């Protein structure tokens, strides 16, 4: 690993090219659907390769998912009722993440899945899923929900899911676009999702927009950089993904949404982001599940804003690609910003709209989001910053650096 020195640009304007949305592209890959071309993160490539290998003629298939948590969890569900044997694993980071949250309900559904100390490698043994299955979601997890839906779809069985807290609905929207027999109703207990997989689905092309989670870093950059403006076209604005955007607008962020349109039931638009002076507020608990991936970059934004940001129920950050709750605290320490952390809560005391810091060294913990957070924070540094490693960024945003260089940033191996 070579440390990277970042010399930020000042007072810039430009257009950002986003990679294709990871969530939508990986679901399309699992269902073997054609999509538009664009920049692909390594997670999408890993899932595509694993799907191709799963369709090979070998009797037992060892599938490697790289760093893709979405890929391994959704593909486990999709393959669980095929009557075939598979072994799914990933890199060191992915193999350290919990998998019982999907294996246990899938086994209750009739699958025969075994784990390695509750983690990957995941062994799928031949099994037939139950003709009907009822499940109440114990946690807010789009990956779990989607894994069960894809299992029922591929095994041609029926499933009913109660979702007390709404999570990302890319799977449901895609299945509706494909004319699967899916019904969604709102009830007192939450969303009631019923899928009859026996009816199958029609194979159609999918337009994959730019990834909103990737856009969040350049949204933050545009807000924090003095006298700057960024144009970000073709961004996916799924209502279950944009809590970050809605929260920032409530904090008086200057973000303009242009040319809204719908493609395969997904909302897409262009964004214009301008330098802003933000006023922090507490985040309602119900927003956290749909904000979880953006909490690291939201924490960086909060550091350079007025007021206090309070986040509760964010324990899920501990089991991401790194322990992101710890990683966020280390970023705030390097910035010299005050915070309070207790159990699954974090309160950040904003250092103010004019706050800058005098450089420093950041640890990425091999986590793409933490690495990008460190880079974005450099725009408020009075001198160069150093990051231990940025290789992980390619898993989700392979053209992140080229976008920055077009704006005038300089990144040098030190």
Image (tube, rainbow, N blue to C red):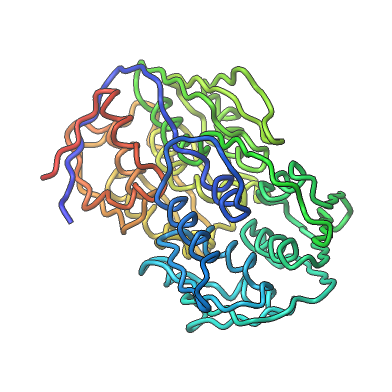
| Quarter of the view holding residue 220 | top left
| Quarter of the view holding residue 262 | top right
Q: x, y percentage for residue 85?
A: 57, 79
Q: For the point 58% across and 76% down, which residue is it? A: 100
Q: For the point 39% across and 39% down, which residue is it? A: 303
Q: Is residue 183 above or below residue 211?
A: below
The quadrant of the picture occupied by the N terminus is: bottom left
The quadrant of the picture occupied by the C terminus is: top left
Q: For the point 45% across and 35% down, which residue is it? A: 38
Q: Is residue 412 left or right of residue 337?
A: left
Q: Is residue 399 above or below residue 182?
A: above
Q: x, y percentage for residue 192?
A: 84, 56
Q: How many marks?
A: 0
| Quarter of the view holding residue 407 | top left
Give 408 or 60, whichever is nearer the viewer: 60
Give 286 or 64, whichever is nearer the viewer: 64
Residue occupying the far left of the picture: 414
Give 57 or 207, whichever is nearer the viewer: 57
Q: x, y percentage for residue 268?
A: 62, 29
Q: Is residue 127 above or below residue 102?
A: below
Q: Is residue 53 left or right of residue 150?
A: left
Q: For the point 57% across and 37% down, which residue is it? A: 208
Q: x, y percentage for residue 385?
A: 20, 40
């Amino acid at each position: 690993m070579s440390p990277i020195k970042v010399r930020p640009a000042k007072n810039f304007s430009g257009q950002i090219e986003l990679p294709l949305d990871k969530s939508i592209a990986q679901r399309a890959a699992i269902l073997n659907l054609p999509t538009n071309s664009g920049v692909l993160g390594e997670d999408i490539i890993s899932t595509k390769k694993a799907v191709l290998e799963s369709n090979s003629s070998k009797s037992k298939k060892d599938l490697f998912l790289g760093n893709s948590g979405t890929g391994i969890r959704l593909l486990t569900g999709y393959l669980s009722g095929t009557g075939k044997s598979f072994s799914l694993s990933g890199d060191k980071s992915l193999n350290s993440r919990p998998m019982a949250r999907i294996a246990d309900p899938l086994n209750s559904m009739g699958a025969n899945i075994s784990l390695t100390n509750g983690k990957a490698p995941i062994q799928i043994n031949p099994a037939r899923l139950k003709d009907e299955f009822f499940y109440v979601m114990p946690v807010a997890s789009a990956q779990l929900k989607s894994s069960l839906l894809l299992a029922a779809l591929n095994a041609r069985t029926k499933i009913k899911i109660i979702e007390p807290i709404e999570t990302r609905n890319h799977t449901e929207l895609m299945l509706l676009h494909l004319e699967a027999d899916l019904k969604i109703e709102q009830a007192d207990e939450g969303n009631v999702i019923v899928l009859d997989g026996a009816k199958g689905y029609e194979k159609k092309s999918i337009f994959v927009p730019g990834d909103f989670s990737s856009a969040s870093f350049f949204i933050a950059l545009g807000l924090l950089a003095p006298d700057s403006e960024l144009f970000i076209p073709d961004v996916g604005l799924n209502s279950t993904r944009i809590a970050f955007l809605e929260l920032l607008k409530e904090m008086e962020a200057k973000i303009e949404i242009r040319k809204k349109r719908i493609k395969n039931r997904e909302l897409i638009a262009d964004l214009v982001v301008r330098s802003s002076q933000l006023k922090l507020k507490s985040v309602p608990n119900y927003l956290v599940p749909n904000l979880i991936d953006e909490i690291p970059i939201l924490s960086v934004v909060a550091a350079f804003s007025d007021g206090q940001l309070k986040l509760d129920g964010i324990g899920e950050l501990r089991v991401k690609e790194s322990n992101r709750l710890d990683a966020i605290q280390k970023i705030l320490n390097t910035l010299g910003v005050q915070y309070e952390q207790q159990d699954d809560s974090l309160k950040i005391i904003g250092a103010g709209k004019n706050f800058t810091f005098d450089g420093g060294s950041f640890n990425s913990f091999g986590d793409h989001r933490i690495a990008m957070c460190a880079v974005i924070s450099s725009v408020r540094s009075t001198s160069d910053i150093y990051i231990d490693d940025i290789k992980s960024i390619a898993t989700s945003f392979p053209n992140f650096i080229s976008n920055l260089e077009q704006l005038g940033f300089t990144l040098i191996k030190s």
